């Protein structure tokens, strides 16, 4: 039994932030019912290639993007622009603990599926709204997407090569990180609301915004600005507060050196054959190294090119200096530590036999994560859920299907 196996979640969200939160809850044991549009479903089902391939090497209907955020869920197709569909969703909400949605502000009110309407039929419901800009403020009505928020929220002002370098300019993170972080924060918020409900009773409305999350996750860089009034600049792979803490060239590629304190720097200098660096007042302390990074970094680069990446990693690990290679994804999933932790796994799939998945990083000793089912086919569980949860007779389900409501 998973830690959340006593909960039912109604997931009206699509794309990534909401589905990511729903998948986390599902991995932890919750029953998650994913409500999708008949015929099309979640937008990401069509966000390919790549698509999952069947046993004959042919593309299936399932895009890899969709498969990343929807396992352990049940897919129910309901057209809630129609009164009959609205009633079905309201009936499901009445029997649910959590509802997740990411429609535009006020978008569900027209269907009677907003928080104020649903709390009347289920006062214990925890209703999590995820939008680009939140329920209030001058931007509330705007649509918000991860890439746009990475720019608007300051992340891209920090990501990319420094001004003046070849290829300088803003660069987004290579995954939809703002969506992922919003999914994580939303999960925390829902669990907090559950704890409050269990203690004091009553559900509540959670207002999550991609922009809020992006600004909150600027972390030390936000504080660097707020404490000085000076906006940080792009430093490429370098760290604004620690030196050396970046990539360096080797004889066969590049590696990452992350020196966290002065003792580690002394050990690195010794391995590099330059022990005098650690005694030089320009470099002996992190404060001095940050101030004199323009002098130190070229010296380090001149030293690192004489050994291979593997040689540097081996030599520095022996003396406790953190470092590592820069892997592509093939190397990531071949890495012995990644393999030992079982981060790549497979689940049975109706169209492909098996579907690859990235395992949850959550490790609980008493209530471990469960992998019950692959991301569902569109509408795969419609009849099952309507009959099992709402008690509809098969004949009634058939009538709804014939009418195009489901």
Image (cartoon, rainbow, N blue to C red):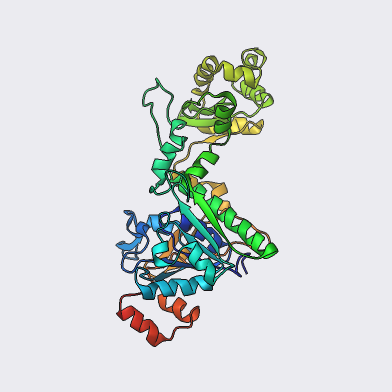
Q: Residue at x 38, y 47 (%)?
A: 142
Residue 174 can be seen in this image: no
Instruction: Depth check: give the residue in front, 103 or 172.
Output: 103
Q: Quadrant of residue 82?
A: bottom left
Name above or below for residue 315 compared with residue 80. above
Instruction: Depth check: give the residue in front, 292 or 37.
Output: 37
Name above or below for residue 376 compared with residue 250. below
Spot occupied by residue 174 in the image (x, y as percentages of width and height) = 42, 41
Spot occupied by residue 167 in the image (x, y as percentages of width and height) = 36, 26
Q: Quadrant of residue 267?
A: top right
Instruction: Depth check: give the residue in front, 299 or 155.
Output: 155
Circle count: 0
Q: Residue at x 58, y 20 (%)?
A: 290
Q: Residue at x 35, y 80 (%)?
A: 400
Residue 68 can be seen in this image: yes
Name above or below for residue 55 compared with residue 231. below
Query: Which quarter of the image is occupied by the N terminus?
Result: bottom right
Name above or below for residue 171 compared with residue 132. above
Query: Which quarter of the image is occupied by the C terminus?
Result: bottom left
Spot occupied by residue 204 in the image (x, y as percentages of width and height) = 58, 60
Spot occupied by residue 149 in the image (x, y as percentages of width and height) = 43, 42
Q: Would you say 279 lies left or right of 182 here?
A: right
Residue ranking furthest to the top:
281
């Amino acid at each position: 039994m998973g830690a959340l196996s006593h909960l039912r979640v109604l997931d009206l969200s699509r794309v990534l932030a909401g589905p990511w939160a729903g998948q986390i809850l599902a991995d932890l044991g919750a029953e998650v019912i994913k409500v999708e549009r008949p015929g099309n479903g979640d937008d990401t089902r069509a966000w390919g290639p790549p698509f999952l391939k069947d046993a004959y090497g042919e593309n299936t209907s399932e895009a890899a993007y969709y498969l990343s955020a929807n396992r352990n869920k049940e897919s129910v197709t309901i057209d809630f622009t129609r009164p009959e569909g609205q009633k079905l969703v309201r009936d499901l909400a009445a029997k649910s603990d959590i509802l997740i949605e990411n429609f535009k502000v006020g978008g569900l009110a027209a269907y009677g599926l907003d928080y104020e309407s649903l709390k009347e039929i289920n006062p214990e419901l925890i209703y999590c709204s995820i939008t680009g800009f939140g329920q209030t403020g001058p931007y509330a009505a705007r649509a918000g997407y991860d890439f746009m928020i990475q720019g608007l929220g300051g992340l891209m002002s920090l990501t990319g090569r420094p001004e003046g370098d070849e290829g300088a300019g803003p660069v987004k993170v290579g995954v939809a990180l703002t969506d992922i972080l919003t999914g994580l924060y939303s999960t925390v918020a829902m669990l907090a609301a559950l704890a409050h409900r269990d203690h004091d009773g009553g559900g509540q409305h959670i207002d999550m915004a991609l922009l809020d999350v992006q600004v909150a996750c600027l972390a030390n860089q936000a504080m660097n600005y707020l404490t000085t009034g000076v906006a940080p600049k792009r430093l490429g792979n370098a760290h604004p507060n620690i030196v050396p803490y970046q990539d360096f060239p080797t004889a066969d590629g590049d590696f990452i050196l992350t020196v966290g304190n002065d003792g580690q720097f002394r050990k690195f200098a010794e391995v590099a054959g330059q022990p005098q660096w650690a005694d030089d007042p320009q470099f002996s302390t992190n404060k001095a190294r940050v101030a004199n990074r323009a002098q130190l970094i070229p010296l380090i680069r001149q030293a690192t090119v004489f050994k291979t990446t593997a040689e540097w990693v081996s030599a520095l690990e022996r003396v406790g200096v953190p470092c590592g290679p820069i892997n592509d994804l093939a190397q990531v999933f071949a890495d012995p530590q990644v393999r030992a932790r079982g981060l790549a796994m497979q689940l049975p799939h109706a169209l492909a036999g098996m579907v690859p998945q990235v395992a949850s990083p959550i490790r609980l000793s008493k209530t471990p994560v469960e992998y019950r089912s692959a991301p569902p086919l569109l509408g795969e569980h419609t009849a099952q859920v309507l009959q099992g949860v709402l008690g509809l007779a098969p004949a009634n389900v058939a009538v709804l299907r014939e009418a195009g409501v489901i």
